[in-house]
Image: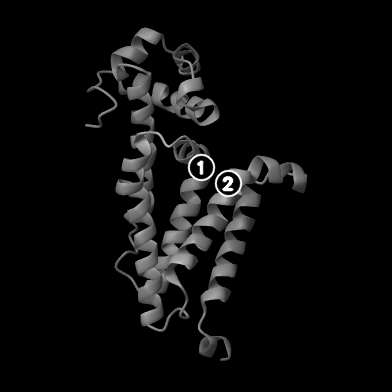
């Protein structure tokens, strides 16, 4: 059981509260979000919010544990983890892209924790972000060692891969205004995914493979 919540008798209500809290915390931060507004969005009352989660701080912790738990199950535990390095890299990229496409609040939640240096940030880095980065680095290193990827700085390449995906979703509201259409629409996301994979394939393909 996560630290942020009790064992619940009505998980549907608790999940609505959790989903509503995620949106409010992403938009306003833990300090700015109001429990009465969260409860209203969840179609619940404040008494139920406090019953399930205790207080606003514990609710905030539960939101973070929930979204990072989903990141781990959706991306870390890829069914391709035992395949060839290039195959695993592709699965990793697709998993992370699809995770962000279905969890639009993730970039803002992480950014808020990092900027405010909350007490949650240390365990987020230790339990999730550092292992996530290290797994990607190892995959790149193994791909280069196997001759499937060209030799690159694995840490810098991991930063590039994560940045080019995360920044798209974080900046989508602004970039949608620039582009004149919704960059989070299904067709726009499909186009972006193809562009990311095309860029990675061409930038990491060994020189000898390109010349064939």
Q: Secondary structure at mark 2?
A: helix
Residue 164 at x, y percent in the picture: 57, 57
Q: Which numbered marker is on residue 72?
A: none
Q: Which type of secondary structure does the marked residue at label 1 adopt?
A: helix
Who comes first in sequence, dot 1 or dot 2?
1
Which residue sits at x=42%, y=73%?
A: 86
Q: Position of residue 205 (x, y in %)?
A: 52, 79
Near-viewer residue (25 or 186) = 25
Q: Answer yes or no: do the residues labelled 1 and 2 have beta carbons within 8 Å?
A: yes
The foreground one among 83 and 18 is: 18
Q: Can residue 12 be seen from the camera position used here?
A: no
Whole-Å distance between the Cαs marked 1 and 2? 7 Å
Tell me, yes or no, if residue 63 can be seen here. yes
Look at mark 2 in the image and give the residue it sits on: 169
Q: Residues within 10 Å of mark 1 (few under 14, many from 20)?
A: some
| Residue 176 at x, y percent in the picture | 71, 44
How many neighbours does mark 2 have within 10 angstroms: few (below 14), some (14-19), or many (20 or more)?
Answer: many
Q: Image height check: is 106 above or below 51?
A: below
At horizontal 48% and vertical 80% (from top left) the residue drawn is: 150
Q: Which residue is mark 1?
A: 107
């Amino acid at each position: 059981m996560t630290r942020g919540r009790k064992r619940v008798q009505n998980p549907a209500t608790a999940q609505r509260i959790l989903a509503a809290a995620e949106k409010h915390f992403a938009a306003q931060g833990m300090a700015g979000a109001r429990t009465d507004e969260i409860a209203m969005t969840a179609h619940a009352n404040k008494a139920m919010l406090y019953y399930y989660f205790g207080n606003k701080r514990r609710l905030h912790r539960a939101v973070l544990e929930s979204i990072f738990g989903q990141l781990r199950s959706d991306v870390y535990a890829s069914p391709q983890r035992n395949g060839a390095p290039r195959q695993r890299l592709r699965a990793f990229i697709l998993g992370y892209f699809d995770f962000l496409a279905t969890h639009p609040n993730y970039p803002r939640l992480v950014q808020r924790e990092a900027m405010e240096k909350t007490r949650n940030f240390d365990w987020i880095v230790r339990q999730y972000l550092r292992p996530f980065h290290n797994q990607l680095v190892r995959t790149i290193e193994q791909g280069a060692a196997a001759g499937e990827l060209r030799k690159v700085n694995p840490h810098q390449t991991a930063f590039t891969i994560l940045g080019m995906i995360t920044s798209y979703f974080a900046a989508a509201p602004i970039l949608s205004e620039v582009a004149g259409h919704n960059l989070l629409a299904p067709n726009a996301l499909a186009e972006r995914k193809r562009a990311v994979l095309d860029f990675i394939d061409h930038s990491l393909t060994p020189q000898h493979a390109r010349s064939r």
